[in-house]
Image (tube, helix red, strand yellow):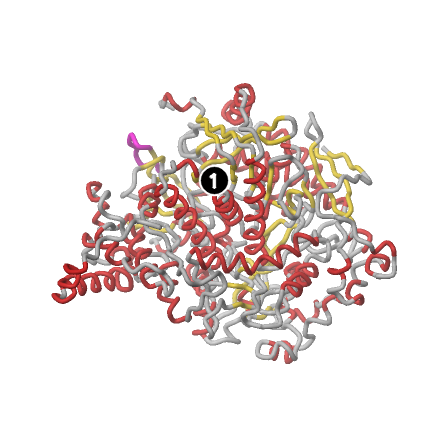
Amino acid sequence: MSDNTINDVEHLACDVLVIGAGGAGLRAAVEARLAGKSVIVISKSLFGKAHTVMAEGGAAAAMGNANANDNWQVHFRDTMRGGKFLNNYRMAELHAQEAPARIWELETYGALFDRTADGRISQRNFGGHEYPRLAHVGDRTGLELIRTLQQKLVSLQQDDEAAGEPESKLQVIDETTITELFTDGGAVKGAFGYRRSTGRFMAIAAPAIVLATGGIGRSFKVTSNSWEYTGDGHALALRAGARLINMEFIQFHPTGMVWPPSVRGILVTESVRGDGGVLKNANGERFMFDYIPEVFKAQYADNPEEADRWYTDPDANRRPPELLPRDEVARAINSEVKAGRGTEHGGVYLDIASRRSADYIKSRLPSMHHQFKELADVDITAAPMEVGPTCHYIMGGIEVEADTAASAVPGLYAAGEVSGGMHGSNRLGGNSLSDLLVFGKRAGEYAAAHAAAAEPPKLADEEIETAIQNALRPFGNDGENPYELQNALQAVNGRLVGIIRKADELEEALTELAALRPRIENVTAVGGRAYNPGWHLALDLRNMYLCSVTTAMAALERDESRGGHTREDAPGMNPEWRKTNLVVSLEEGAGEVRLTRQPVPQMPPELLDLFDPTELSKYMTPEEYRRDSPAGTPSAGTGPADTDSTEAEEA
Amino acid sequence: MSARTFRVWRGDAEGGDFAEFDVEVNEGEVVLDVVHRIQAEQAPDLAVRWNCKAGKCGSCSAEVNGRPRLMCMTRMNVFEEDEPVTITPLRTFPVVRDLVTDVSFNYEKSRRMPAFAPPKDLRPGEYRMQQVDVERSQEFRKCIECFLCQNTCHVVRDHDENKPEFAGPRLFIRAAELDMHPLDARSDRREWAQDDQGLGYCNITKCCSDVCPENIKITDNAIIPMKERVAGERYDPLVWLGRKIFRKDKAPKSE
């Protein structure tokens, strides 16, 4: 720390501050800049490395290129089914309607998707999608998305430069972490953070902020998520006064690598199954036929012959059960392993080698072929892969207004994984890339409009000083190493809040988390401020802790099983619970987490009509879907409602 | 499980030295796993970049026993049992701290790259391209921006003085990608590579292709075709005469 400028805080200002440089953040930044606003994008990693690059399979959009029967209504239906009807219907509706335009727009930015024979964007099959729907580039679609948006931002910067505008009109600040949001009278007015490379602090005044920070996966040991995924946006929003919904719903992707141990959790794309791969247990049995739930029997084949015919004749046959929504497949694999039919390393086999030619596999799944060859010495054109569930995605997140992506805090918007509601209790594969484009754009648009009507905010020295003290605290502590504490936190979540849950274990988890709290508060960083990962993790830990508590609390409260929340002691869906969202917020002052219930927005009749009443009857109480019933009339339901029915206090 | 000696360069722009760590290594591990173990158990402030740990993001580039590599894709079993493992930061870029370097050179060069120019007569949704035509550019879009090619290229590796004039292999494949893009509306990508990116500095030693973790044929499929076509147009007497008469100047940098 010989550098004397290290203690000078860097002061910046902009109209729209975007925190997060993945797909949602970059799309929001494009929109806000196109609306004429000055924009700063904060990237936790280098520009272009965000977790979006890990998305493999594709982006779901009902363009109808591969099957002309597809349209937004079918996509909407699939999304609601996948989410077990807990979704914010309006978000699912907007998403299904706008996804095609968002994908086509990427082509005008330079994206090169794989093509159909007639030159349009090719679409592939994926779990839970009735028709081939995923726009893709081999199995590296996320990379294409992030690079395309990255290059679009650069082109906007070049336009500004050509027009004589300063760079600060659209600035990307990389390797920077935000640790606090500043509020005034309940509205956001700026943020505080540090540059990783120097440790120098930064305060940014902005009347509108878009959170696009992704998920919470690093709170679990077996995860497909990168180190960045520490729930920063979830925690920042809570502390700023926003609410989170659906935090109990975590998606365990059914197919992560399981061997060797160092790669455990790394994603194996669902495209392997979409392109013909099947799951087998150690006895060689194709077990998914035994796990088709009642609600999906009409759409999924119950025998291998029909399932195999589906690939060539999807109109006359039902889909293979390997393509059930992810929660179903993950639970099935879990059950097989528990029943002693797992592989040597505790997974099951994913076999495409015996079903497709080597050339086909290499052209459709090039990065899977590469990944297994390099990391596991397995040639997937000749041998099956060993796979098992891995923590992949959190459906829960910041409660937002569907149309505007606005949170309950004026000026604060959220898009992508950090927002909640769109996917209900379970997200369909491919709906994430399209989600972040649709709602990234909307967040940027409405944040820009908010900024246009707002006064430039001022940050006070005292609040910046407090933020500095908070950030430096780990250097003065005498507690434990942050890596040990992260392991301890991951162990609690993995053991007690994982794919299968029980009330007593969740209570135990809350007790153990409470015991971790003082240890995390006393976490210690050694060394200097310049590029110090130990210090960075020490600061991330409090966010991981807060998110873990909200998940465990909500999981304990919801005594039913639905989507990404399975309670062994409360199997099956309960139609009463379908009507209820669990909402968390922070108490003023002490900062304790408060859990409340509020109704799920009710679908209006024109959307209910898209479903067969027999299907709705599997999810809903009769008065909800029967058109002759007065209780079936819809509420506005597009925004956060203020209804508390019960309260549960928890430290 | 076995015990290994890791020598990791530690320091900053002012200078530094190797630190030695005795550390355990388990079956199937990659170099990045071992670096993480050193971080967790012995040196919590050891600076290293990483994200996906699956060869998809291109963050964890370093030089392992002298060879530019992604640490997450370098398995420990490529080394002999008793061979020490030495890790140094990328040599071509200034050190920030330990294994982290300042790679802003690459981002500055891409800021100068004229963007994709969409065809004026097509609206979103109307783009039609054949798979065989997009595949040429798709090869270059596999690039994960690990910058190993930039790091290994001898034009800049020990020659900072060439950096202002030379964009490097990463940006050559970007130029080739746009040149081969079926619908890009500009026709001066090759000339731009030659005149503004310093394509002429490259004398096709193929070091960039050798270190590319995505196995992109940088030299064969991007650089050589661009060089050949530039040469064909520049030194063909008829084309030369045409250029003299019609004065085809450099196009503006971007639209």
- Seen in the image, is A91 located left or right of residue A116? right
Q: Three-letter amino acid code at disc 1? A: Val
Residue A395 image offset from top left, x and y in percent: 64, 50
* Mark 1 surroundings within 10 Å by alpha-carbon count, few (fewer than 14), some (14 through 19), many (20 or more): many
Return the residue nearer the eye: A363 or A125: A125
Residue B186 image offset from top left, x and y in percent: 32, 59
Q: Which chain contains the residue that carries disc 1?
A: A
- Seen in the image, is A556 located left or right of residue A543? right
The residue sitting at 47% across, 31% down in the picture is A194
The C terminus of chain A is located in which quarter?
top right
Residue segment shown in magenta: B12-20
Q: In the rendered view, would you say A30 is above or below A374?
A: above
Return the residue nearer the eye: B130 or B50: B130
Which of the 4 image quarters holds residue A544? top right
Return the residue nearer the eye: A297 or A409: A409
The N terminus of chain A is located in which quarter?
top left
Residue located beneath label 1 in the image: A41
